[in-house]
Image (tube, grey):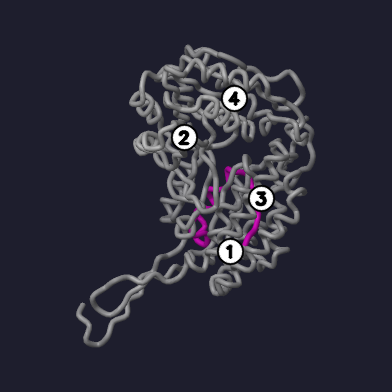
Amino acid sequence: MEPKVKTSPIKTVNPFNNELVKSFDVMTAAQIESKIALADKAFQSWRKTPKAKRAQLLHRVAHLLRVKAAQLAELATLEMGKLFKESQGEVALCADIFEYYATNGEKFLADQPLETPHGSAFLSYEPLGVILSIQPWNFPFYQITRSAAPHLMAGNTMLLKHASNIPQCAQIMEDIFLEAGFPEGVYQNLFIPGSETDVLVADERIKAVTFTGSEPAGSSIAAAAGKYIKKSTLELGGSDAFVVLDDADVEQAAEAAVRGRIWNAGQVCVSPKRIIVEEGIADLFLEKVKAKFAALKVGDPMDEKTDLAPLSSEKAVNDVIKQVQTAVEQGATVITGGHRINRPGAFMEPTILADIRPGTAAYQEEIFGPVFMFYKVKDEQAAIDLANATEFGLGGSVFSSNNERAVNVARQMVTGMVYINHVTGIAPELPFGGTKHSGYGREQSPAAIYEFVNAKLIRVTTADSAY
């Protein structure tokens, strides 16, 4: 493959102080070709490696993640600014996911018998080949893990194109796979710009692509995969509804909403973005949220006492500020916040927007920062209608003291996931993914391991069997 344009080095810039830490050269066409060839070659032997051996190596990755947890967490905080305690939680989650597939992968991939009146039949789950994984910066290790763990366990090999602002996190994961004993070529990192990914998808040695990122980029990747008849999975973000019914515990709901929204400085696809509250408790809920926002401590993400970290970059904070300004120009009201914090680093005030009208940008867009879009609705049906009034369909939450009522509301929300009395969360055994413009396919849980395998039918008949 030949580069389209001459590109700048890939850089680590600390968003806490905007200082350049380290840079990496973009890989040449020859280097990229070498890595693709190695991944393809490695697949020929990795696919034949016993599942028990693959599982053993995944267990080693989980062990190394736990041993190196402090180093990895510090690196994530350095490169994209998240709270150190959140980075520690992310690394622990990744170890659990690798452990989950190491423990259960053989069972998930076992032949599945099928009932047939003549002879016998079963499905054999066989790997596809080289998988291209294109991932964002907001969870530097988790984004890698939720695609790598199941697909490597299934016998595929993987090439990672990670976000350009977290190159050290990308590289250290390749180092960990090698240290764990994975054969060379089974998992490799690519230092390339996003503009080169369509070319990679076209390469016949790459058999499938998994992408997490923006809707425009995902559409481009899906189009390229479709053109070359390759399987793809997409997770394209969301504008999750956080529905608070009038019988909810208001204090519990307000605390969950605030903690969910400032998680990762608001840079989470499934954090609560559209807060939809029945009018009987809306004012009380809003006052509690405002008080909790005012009590947040902003500062050094390495400090255990800090509540709100910087956004991932200057571009990220400027983009959110621009979205808020556009919302105000289109009639929205800023209840609190709305500005950049006057201090070094990419910090944004926790913000609440109200009076957001249909047809405006904020009504449809995802705001990737610590910003609530607040809606007061007259009743339960109005809450459901508003929750579904978006092109996205990733996650969502319903708060109510009546679980039966909450589940009934959840069933009517058009999303991939709904959590009751909890913000949309993450666990190895629970599927993660959305619908509508939030994408397709599932990660985590047993479902993930079947995304990139060939479910081959094998039927055995006897001489006297009918057809």
Query: Tag 2, which secondary structure?
Result: strand
Name the residue located 48 percent from the left edge and 37 percent from the top edge. 215
Q: Work out whether mark 2 precedes mark 1 in sequence or the reverse, and give the earlier one.
A: 1
Q: Position of residue 154 (x, y in %)?
A: 52, 65
**Residue 29 visible in the picture:** no
Instruction: Assess whether residue 207 is covered by the magenta stretch.
Output: yes
Disc 3 to disc 2: CB gap under 8 Å: no
Q: What number is the disc on residue 102?
A: 1
| Along the line of sight, the residue nearer the viewer: 351 or 408 | 408
Nearer the observer: mark 2 or 4; the answer is: 2
**Label 3 crowd (10 A; few <14 / some 14-19 / many >=20):** some
The answer to whether 272 appears left or right of 300 in the picture is left
Q: Which amino acid lies under the numbered mark 2 shown in the image of this protein? A: Ser
Q: Residue furthest bottom?
A: 463
Q: Quadrant of the N terminus?
A: bottom right
Residue topped by disc 3: 92
Residue topped by disc 4: 320
Nearer the observer: mark 4 or 1; the answer is: 1
Instruction: Assess whether residue 134 is covered by the magenta stretch.
Output: no
| Above or below for 234 versus 118 | above
| Above or below for 218 versus 119 | above
In space, the residues marked 2 and 1 are separated at their CA atoms by 31 Å
